[in-house]
Amino acid sequence: MTLQSNADIELDHQLVWQMSPNGIDWIKIGYGNALAFTVSEEDAQAYVRFRMADGTFSDACQLNALIPGETDEAEVTDETEGAEATDGTENAEATDEAEQLPVAEPVRLPDNRKVSIDLAWEDEEDPGFGSVALLTATLEGYDELDYTLQWVYSEDQENWTMLEGANEAELRVTASEENYLYYWRVEVHVDGFKSNV
């Protein structure tokens, strides 16, 4: 099955797809405007949605897929009839055309993956405003995966903002009165995966 968002094409790899068995507990299943995956028996009635880079979510949709042998059709239905997306996008839907696309086997991420971030001040024994902080992300368990990095920051640890062009393992930030209390993290976007955590 292929899920297709109607978000701006420039947001590709910034959309985070999520799945839930009950519409409450969500796990990541992939990134990008389109997501292809094989529907299993346990996912046949699951809910799906996607999160934008600004932290907003699409409306949740419920898969209505029957197990092979019962029927060869699968569809996505809206969780609430007549609901409209509040972020300017339409609900994710699977079309007949999309279902004819080849479906790649989902990639299971290794269990031992982790990301750590180190902070060091460049040439400063007593850092202050104007000092340059070096943030370094170290990844483990991602060696065989095709991924991209994206640094984001937040004032409250709830609403995160993407830092344009910050896609390397190292990030230099000049401390200022505006940003010295910011929280920083790095997102690892793995192409076309279904998470096993």
Image (tube, grey):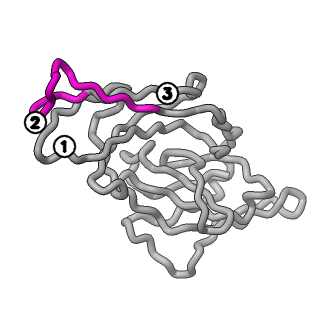
Q: State which quadrant residue 146 falls in.
A: top right
Q: Residue at the spot x=28%, y=25% of the render?
A: 120
Query: From the viewer's perspective, is 77 left or right of 88?
Result: right
Q: Amino acid at mark 1?
A: Tyr
Confirm whether residue 151 shows in the render: yes
| Residue 97 percent across, percent down from the top left | 62, 53
Q: How dense is the environment of label 3, judged by Cα within 10 Å: few (below 14), some, or many (20 and up)?
A: some
Q: How dense is the environment of label 1, judged by Cα within 10 Å: few (below 14), some, or many (20 and up)?
A: few
Direction top: furthest residue: 123
The circle on residue 20 is: none
Q: Amino acid at mark 2?
A: Phe
Q: Residue at the spot x=48%, y=33% of the render?
A: 115
The kind of secondary structure element at disc 2 is loop
Front residue (pair 94, 143)? 143
Q: Indicate whether residue 173 is drawn in magenta.
A: no
Q: How dense is the environment of label 2, judged by Cα within 10 Å: few (below 14), some, or many (20 and up)?
A: few
- Residue that carries the numbered disc 1 in the rendered image: 180
Front residue (pair 191, 172)? 172
Label whose residue precedes the other's in the sequence (2 or 1): 2
Q: Residue at the spot x=39%, y=38% of the render?
A: 186
Q: Is residue 84 above or below residue 152?
A: below
- Residue that carries the numbered disc 2 in the rendered image: 129
Q: Residue at the spot x=37%, y=66% of the render?
A: 88
Q: Is residue 22 above or below residue 125?
A: below
Q: Are marks 1 and 3 in contact (CB under 8 Å)?
A: no
Count of numbered tags: 3
Query: From the viewer's perspective, is 92 left or right of 38?
Result: left
| Residue 187 percent across, percent down from the top left | 43, 40
Q: Amino acid at mark 3?
A: Leu
